[in-house]
Amino acid sequence: MAIRAFFQLASVFTALLLLAVWVSAAEPRVRATLSSPTVGVGESVNYELTVEGDEAPQNPPVPNVDGLEVRGTSQSSQLSIINTNVTRRVTVTYTLVPKREGKFTIPEMEVVVDGRRMKTQPVMLTVTAGESMKEEGDFAFAKIWLEKKSLYIGEVASIELRVYLDASADWQLRSSPNLNGDGFTTQPMSKPGQRNIQLAGKTYHLVSFNTVITPGKAGTLNIGPVPVGLVVSKPLRNQPRFDIFGRNTGSALETTVNAPAFEIQVKPLPVEGRPMDFSGAVGKFEFDATGRPDRVKLGQPVTMKLTVKGHGNFDRIGQPPLADPDGWTSYTAKPQFDGAENGGTTGVKTFELPVTPTVKKTAMPVFAFSFFDPEAGKYVTLKSAAAALTVEGDPVAAAPSPALAVELGAVSAGFGPRMSPAVLFGTMFAPLPLILAAMAWRARKRDGKAARLAALRKEQAAMMARVKSASDRAEVLDAAVKTLQIQAALESGRDGTEWDLAGILNSRKLDAGAEEAVRELFEARNERLYAGASRGDDRISDRERDQVLDTLANLQKVPRI
């Protein structure tokens, strides 16, 4: 029996040892989050620093921001194995109490994880004057909090639903609240967070739900009201009755607390100054691009990594284009996004793609990224730095022309001084390389223009096919606008991305009805394209598709001015 027990123990030990070898550590990560993006003066908020790695973080930093007092620190850890990946998650929680109103930025925090230095994203905290009672003695009330009452189309804004309950009561949530309305999109409400606050000398449970709102059309929008269904056990005052836990509470009652509605003003994105490569990104972003290797042969690709980080509607950020595509062949990359916090509005989006030089280059390809900054009220275009690049090798040379057989006889003295055959040949054919180079340049230019026109016609056909077959309204409207832009490019010989609404309207003399139809097409497309999060099942009807097709057909019937 002792021998059997020994072998069983040895088997278990061996299995554990093999498991430890088999599993692998997950890639280390760090992130920082706030329990609420807004608090009042004197209210507490939790700043959580979460570290994932094979080892615990070394000396985690403490946030040091003037105006925010650190009241306490706690730490928890968790170990998990998922798909052979071992993840050690350590969360350091700092309780912060703001001392004054204003906007505070908790800067990026550097943490050493598994010997690597990693940084968090900065987080923003807005501190208000604090809540006040609607009426002394209120048992429960609710409100919707939005920092800004004026937004642009496509601008993301954090919105918070706050429910205040008498701290002497017990409560349970009947169902998650929903923020519904017309003209904006939202994401599902977060799980409720709870903390205690003092209002007029009375302690309240503050239960908060967070989400993100993105307006999709200009004008006045109504936000709310939002009902919150609760099951509440109020304290017994006249007839004390204690439960088995010693709490003086009555029977559970279902109740609904309503957060009143309010209005916000939504401004359209300006047409003036809009970059041609603007894809709808609205927010505050940083952009850079790095390439490797820095030495390649002609025709071999450079792997470029494009990085966009910041705060805004990341779902509208497409692959940044080449600032100058001449001499480069680029490809489409599949984006990756890291930023689950704050509803996916703060994070990092990356694109990794091969870019091949077709001629000798001395610098990495330069990419451009355009976005609209709602704080500054203007468009911003950022370009990546042109790092050094060495391209080796020569382009494939064209086959040489057959040699010209020239017989030079004796030159009569009557024609002046006698020349040697070599000097005469050089004099006669000296301009030939320049002439051949000019002819080759004109041929390449003509062939390049023909290729671009062919590519535009192919793209226009693809856009028309999408208008006729796509089911999503935003996709149909976007394809229709691009069809008009490509048509204008084909007629003018200029790039299709140069054509905005004003350019297309000025290219034709339209009657009032046709002009209004084109304006409505562009506005409807922009509202859906720049609104950020998906609208769900936004299918286009047959009647709407027919209207779009009629608008395209009527515009093409009118000749250019």
Image (cartoon, rainbow, N blue to C red):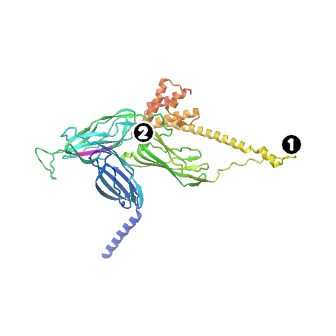
In the displayed structure, would residue 84 be above or below residue 36? Answer: below
Q: Which mark is residue 348?
A: none
The quadrant in which residue 166 appears is top left
Measured from the top left, where is residue 214 in percent x and y?
Answer: 38, 39
Label 2: how many Cα within 10 Å (few below 14, some 14–19, many 20+): few
Examine the residues drawn in magenta and state their main secondary structure.
strand
**Residue 169: where, in percent of width, then height?**
19, 46
Answer left or right for 197 relative to 121: left
Span highlighted in magenta in the image: 204-210
Task: Work out whether residue 536 or residue 543 is closer to the camera in this orientation and state it.
Answer: 536
Q: Which mark is residue 416?
A: 1
Which residue has dot 2 on it? 376
554 or 486, nearer to the observer = 486
- Circle 1 packing at 10 Å, graded few (<14), some (14-19), many (20+), is few
- The answer, for residue 472, to whether it is visible in the render is no
500 shown above or below 112: above
